[in-house]
Image (cartoon, rainbow, N blue to C red):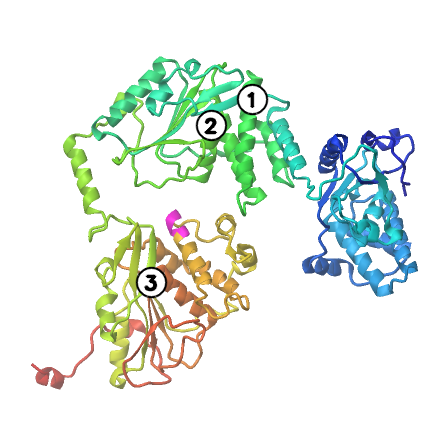
């Protein structure tokens, strides 16, 4: 073990072990504050961030999960002996070498022995030992294999230290690391500690003021993070920085045509335009204006890239050329991926690329629930596109050169959005043309300047050549406007005009069900569209009993409802708790802290709905979220039923997903018929299944000839019940192929029928 030594000045902390006046470690408590102390803490914080551990407040106590994992790995054994502790450390912290293992074990042993001599019971010693082991693994594992090396790891503790915390810090210090404690003024908790655990020296001086009571590392952290960020982006201080849109006059295309040299002349800045034009000012002149704009850019020798619709995905060859490895954190990954950005002709431009890449990737990393693997995939896509287009946009680049990237149509993917944000932060103008205002918009960016026109126009391609220039006549555009008027919240709708819907359960008479069953949504009572959301009047009913005990007519009446859009369950249960379900093992990942982790679900390898329309995938997840939040199923947020709901909702049969994919909210909706002739209660899974399909817009109709209860799993009254006849038992569901769609009648009935 290493001994604690005295320092002569604060810079001693940054001296390597072999170069110190006395070979040992430093364990100090800061008792005052000055400019010198502030600078030292800044430097020490930075050193601890790079090679050490920073604690502000308290070291969190081991959680139940931490303890469960410890007991699973190590058991409940405990002996106050060096051999036992060394063997345990070897298994628990295998990255330590033999010398580090011995030093840590000896230090733990000494600390526990001190506690024993002070009167602690064996059970208390066991608890202290387990706490030390958990803290070492969950808080200090990153430095245990660096203890005692030339570059000693640093621990910075800011706050009121407890006895056990101080003992553990002593363990680590003795094993080979420096420790600095910072206690805000007025905090005398240190004086109340067990004298045996007060192992630190004080650093104080005559001219030092008190450490402020609200002292924190926030400002130090911000300054260091800013410095580190700049170093990652530029490699050194300074750089070539964007001045985006601050110089424009709001003219749109005319701003982009302004000569780069006339936009501004401040040293160290480049001036670019980042613009989206929504809609068109004049349908008759729009295409020609774009063509003339394109010709003007070409005449001025500006580099131009035009993308129509969406940026082509990277090829396999492009992806394979991106160098990458395994990463443990976002910052490490971004810094390493940056190495793929090369522009030998201009180190200035390369630094700008690196800075822009880091900025957009760090913003992406801050998004909730994004995994490191997902972030890396985004980074790889971004790098592929940078490599693909940098030669086109920045060919023979020199200062004041500004290329132009034109994107025709709104961005259709998150990766495209990321690339556009990158381009907006390098020496290039970015023009996004969004003439069709009905097309959804994904890109949102505080740097983006927008120009909005009320008129919408469909235009698929940017007119780069005369052959691509299609200019509509006044009559042509008038017809398109007529379409807009016709398909605007009336009884005439475009195919799949709407992407959002809410369901309304209809209260009907039993005979009305047959009238409404095959009726399109838009013709049903209470159908409406409000702000682009459809209100779907659906059926959710239970038919109890058999009319006049006529079973043949009963089964015919059921078959008459079996349309091509109908799913039939006639041998329940359909789902049970033991049914095969590949989603079950992942539901804990998909629902955390009371929230559905939508991004994680959609990017997970087991996600089964990736082939559906994007808007329909979002619709399914919206309804899943609604079902959980409204607690429609008994036990939600009480006994884990929410996880069962997720496993059922994300494991719909292929027949159902196909019906959902084809579902147009204004037309015929899909349906489910559920027949139960037995005395078997409906399962929780089947209850979830039927209620979820109803939320999605299915008509759900139960045929229960026995009249038995089927809503025992529902938290509220979800369905209407219709009593249509006598309860009948032990009925057998027929072979539907043998059931005709009309009832057979005798010759006597035909002759003597009424009328």
What's the CA distance linking mark 3 and mark 2? 45 Å
Q: Position of residue 383 (x, y in %)?
A: 52, 30
Instruction: Tell me the crowding category of disc 1: few under 14, some 14 to 19, or many 20 or more residues within 10 angstroms, Cα based.
Output: some
Residue 678 at x, y = what percent?
Answer: 40, 80
Q: Main secondary structure of the magenta part?
A: helix
Q: Which residues are magenta?
A: 614-618
Q: Is residue 615 magenta?
A: yes
Counting every numbered tag in the picture gives 3
Is tag 1's residue or tag 2's residue first in the polypeptide sequence? 1
358 sits left or right of 126 in the view: left
The quadrant in which residue 249 appears is: top left
Residue 681, position in %: x, y? 44, 78
Residue 122 position (above or below residue 171)? below
Q: Residues within 10 Å of mark 3 (few under 14, many from 20)?
A: many
Residue holding disc 3: 698
Is the residue marked by circle 2 packed among few (<14), some (14-19), or many (20+) residues within 10 Å?
A: many
Label ID, residue 350: 1
Q: Residue at x 44, y 63 (%)?
A: 630
Q: Which residue is mark 2?
A: 423
**Mark 2 element type:** helix
How far apart are the two marked residues, 1 and 2, measured between alpha carbons? 13 Å
Task: Point out the residue furthest to the left here.
Answer: 755
**Hey, which quadrant is residue 292 in on the image?**
top left
Q: Are marks 3 and 1 in contact (CB under 8 Å)?
A: no
């Amino acid at each position: 073990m290493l001994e604690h030594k005295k320092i002569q000045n604060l810079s001693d902390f940054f001296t390597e072990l072999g170069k110190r006046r006395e070979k040992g470690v430093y364990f100090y408590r800061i008792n005052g504050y000055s400019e010198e102390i502030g600078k030292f803490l800044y430097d020490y914080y930075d050193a601890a961030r790079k090679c050490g551990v920073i604690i502000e407040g308290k070291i969190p106590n081991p959680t139940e999960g931490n303890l469960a994992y410890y007991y699973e790995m190590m058991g409940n054994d405990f002996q106050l002996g060096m051999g036992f502790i060394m063997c345990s450390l070897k298994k628990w912290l295998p990255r330590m070498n033999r010398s580090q293992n011995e030093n840590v074990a000896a230090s733990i042993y000494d600390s526990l022995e001190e506690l024993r001599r002070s009167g602690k019971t064996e059970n208390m010693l066991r608890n202290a030992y387990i706490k030390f082991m958990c803290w070492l693994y969950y808080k200090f594992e990153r430095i245990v294999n660096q203890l005692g090396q030339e570059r000693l790891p640093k621990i910075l503790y800011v706050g009121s230290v407890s006895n056990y915390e101080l003992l553990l810090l002593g363990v680590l210090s003795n094993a080979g690391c420096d420790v600095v404690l910072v206690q805000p003024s007025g905090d005398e908790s240190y004086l109340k500690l067990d004298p045996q655990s007060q192992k630190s020296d004080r650093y104080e001086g005559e001219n030092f003021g008190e450490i402020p009571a609200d002292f924190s590392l926030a400002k130090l952290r911000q300054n260091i993070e800013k410095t580190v960020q700049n170093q990652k982006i530029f490699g050194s201080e300074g750089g070539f920085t964007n001045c985006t849109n601050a110089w424009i006059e709001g003219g749109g295309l005319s701003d982009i045509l302004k000569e780069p040299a006339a936009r501004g002349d401040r040293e160290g800045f480049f001036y670019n335009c980042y613009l989206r034009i929504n809609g068109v000012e004049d349908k008759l002149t729009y295409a020609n204006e774009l063509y003339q704009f394109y010709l003007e850019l070409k005449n001025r020798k500006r580099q131009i890239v035009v993308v129509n619709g969406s940026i082509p995905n990277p090829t396999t060859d492009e992806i394979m050329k991106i160098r990458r490895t395994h990463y443990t954190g976002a910052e490490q990954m971004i810094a390493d991926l940056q190495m793929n950005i090369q522009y030998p002709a201009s180190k200035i431009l390369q630094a700008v690329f690196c800075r822009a890449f880091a900025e957009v990737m760090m913003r992406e990393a801050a998004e909730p629930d994004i995994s490191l693997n997902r972030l890396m995939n985004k980074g790889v896509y971004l790098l592929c596109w940078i490599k693909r287009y940098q030669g086109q946009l920045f060919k023979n680049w020199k200062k004041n050169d500004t290329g132009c990237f034109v994107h025709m149509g709104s961005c259709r993917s998150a990766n495209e959005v990321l690339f556009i944000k990158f381009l907006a932060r390098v020496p290039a103008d970015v023009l996004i043309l969004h003439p069709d205002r009905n097309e959804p918009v994904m890109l949102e960016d505080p740097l983006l300047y927008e120009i909005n026109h009320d008129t919408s126009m469909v235009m698929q391609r940017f007119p780069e050549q005369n052959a691509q220039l299609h200019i509509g006549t006044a009559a042509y555009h008038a017809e398109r406007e007529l379409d807009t008027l016709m398909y605007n919240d009336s009884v005439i709708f475009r195919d799949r005009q709407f992407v959002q819907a809410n369901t309304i359960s209809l209260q009907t008479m039993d005979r009305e069900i047959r009238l409404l069953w095959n009726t399109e949504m838009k013709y049903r009572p209470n159908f409406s569209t409000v702000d682009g959301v459809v209100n779907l009047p659906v059926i959710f009913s239970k038919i109890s009993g058999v009319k006049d005990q006529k079973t043949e007519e009963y089964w015919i009446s059921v078959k008459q409802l079996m349309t091509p859009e109908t799913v039939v369950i006639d041998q329940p249960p359909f789902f049970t708790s033991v049914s095969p379900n590949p989603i079950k093992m992942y539901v804990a990942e998909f629902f955390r802290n009371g929230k559905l982790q939508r991004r994680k679900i959609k990017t997970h390898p087991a996600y089964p709905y990736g082939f559906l329309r994007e808007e329909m995938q979002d619709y399914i997840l919206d309804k899943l979220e609604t079902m959980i939040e409204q607690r429609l199923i008994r036990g939600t947020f009480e006994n884990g039923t929410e996880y069962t709901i997720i496993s059922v909702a994300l494991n719909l049969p292929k027949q159902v997903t196909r019906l959902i994919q084809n579902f147009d909210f204004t037309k015929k909706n899909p349906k489910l018929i559920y027949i139960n002739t037995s005395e078997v209660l409906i399962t929780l899974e089947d209850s979830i299944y039927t209620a979820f399909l109803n939320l999605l817009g299915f008509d759900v109709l139960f045929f229960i000839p026995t009249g038995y209860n089927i809503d025992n799993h529902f938290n509220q009254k979800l369905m209407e019940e219709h009593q249509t006849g006598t309860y009948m038992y032990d009925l057998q569901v027929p072979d539907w192929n043998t059931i005709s769609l009309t009832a057979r009648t005798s010759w006597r009935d035909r002759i003597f029928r009424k009328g």
